[in-house]
Image (cartoon, rainbow, N blue to C red):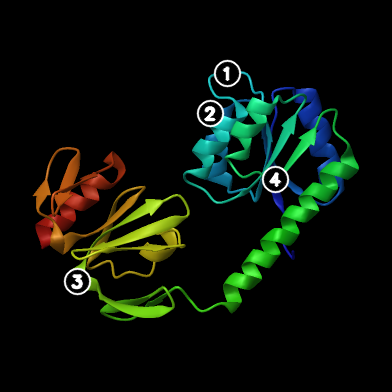
Amino acid sequence: MTDKTKILIVEDDMIIAANISLQLTNLGYEITGIVCRGEDAILHVQENKPDILLLDIHLKGKLDGIETAKLIQSKNELSLIYLTANSDDATFSIARETHPMAFISKPLNLLELKRAIELVEAQVRKHKQEKEHRDPEIEFMDDRIFVRQNGKRIKLLLKFILYIEAERNYCNVVTEEKSYLLSSTLKSISEQLPTSLFIRVHRSYVINISRLDVVAESHIEIKRKVIPVSKTYREVLLKRIKTI
């Protein structure tokens, strides 16, 4: 990687965390921060966008490491490495559902941690290269998009798209007739859609403003689908409605 790999350390033992930070910095990695609570980790990831989350499974506080990982993964795409002093089979089974790249046992072995991070970097590079070389899943044109489904290119006129819903690192593009699941983030799709027709109303929803049926205090409806509206986007939505 040409840029430094950015790592967030989430560890409630600050002596251990500081030692990890020092050693990884000496190896050339960028430490975006050290936090000791899951709640702080969630906020930090949103603001600093690390590449790797180095996360203790047994955190103190309301959120343990696994719960923290699930909440972060619901909104962000990053690689996960767990730190654990001891993990029973039940905990390991639950942790595995978050698809970590590695489990590193405490006390930490620097060589083992370094190799785990290098494997993550290699996996990320491979995924990026594969993504760049395969046919694009979605192509944008002035009044339409083409989506790839089952080896075919399907034309969708923008005016017939009702809304787009985020599902972790996937998106559902919903029309009156059917929906199309794409392995793209809501952010990447919404940035290429015309703002004259599409508007974000929630972290998980972009809507076709011309297809609005109902506007309520905290939600809207399109074809009887109830879609939440965040306070962040409500004022912009109301202004746009007045211009239709």
Name the amino acid, label 1: Gly
Picture residue at 57% right of the left edge, 38% below the top: 44
Q: Tell me where residue 229 appears, x and y as whole percent.
A: 25, 43
Mark-to-mark CA distance, 1 and 2: 9 Å
How many numbered marks does the figure carry? Answer: 4
The picture quadrant where one finds residue 102 is top right
Mark 2 surroundings within 10 Å by alpha-carbon count, few (fewer than 14), some (14 through 19), many (20 or more):
some
Picture residue at 19% right of the left edge, 70% below the top: 160
Name the amino acid, label 3: Lys
Picture residue at 46% right of the left edge, 62% below the top: 183
Of label 3 and label 2, which has the lower sequence position? 2
Q: Where is mark 2, residue-wise?
A: 39
Q: Where is mark 3, residue-wise?
A: 159
Picture residue at 77% right of the left edge, 49% below the top: 117
Q: Say if residue 4 shows up in the picture.
A: no
Q: Secondary structure at mark 1?
A: loop
Question: Is 238 left, or right, of 180 in this rendering?
Answer: left
The picture quadrant where one finds residue 231 is top left
Q: Tell me where residue 126 appears, x and y as whole percent.
A: 69, 66
Q: Where is mark 1, residue-wise?
A: 61
Of label 2 and label 4, which has the lower sequence position? 4
Name the amino acid, label 2: Glu
Please, is residue 208 above or below residue 19 in the view? below
1 or 4: mark nearer the eye: 1
Q: Secondary structure at mark 2?
A: helix
Q: Secondary structure at mark 4?
A: strand
Question: Is 225 left, or right, of 72 in this rendering?
Answer: left
Of label 3 and label 1, which has the lower sequence position? 1
Q: Where is mark 4, residue-wise?
A: 7
Mark 1 surroundings within 10 Å by alpha-carbon count, few (fewer than 14), some (14 through 19), many (20 or more):
few
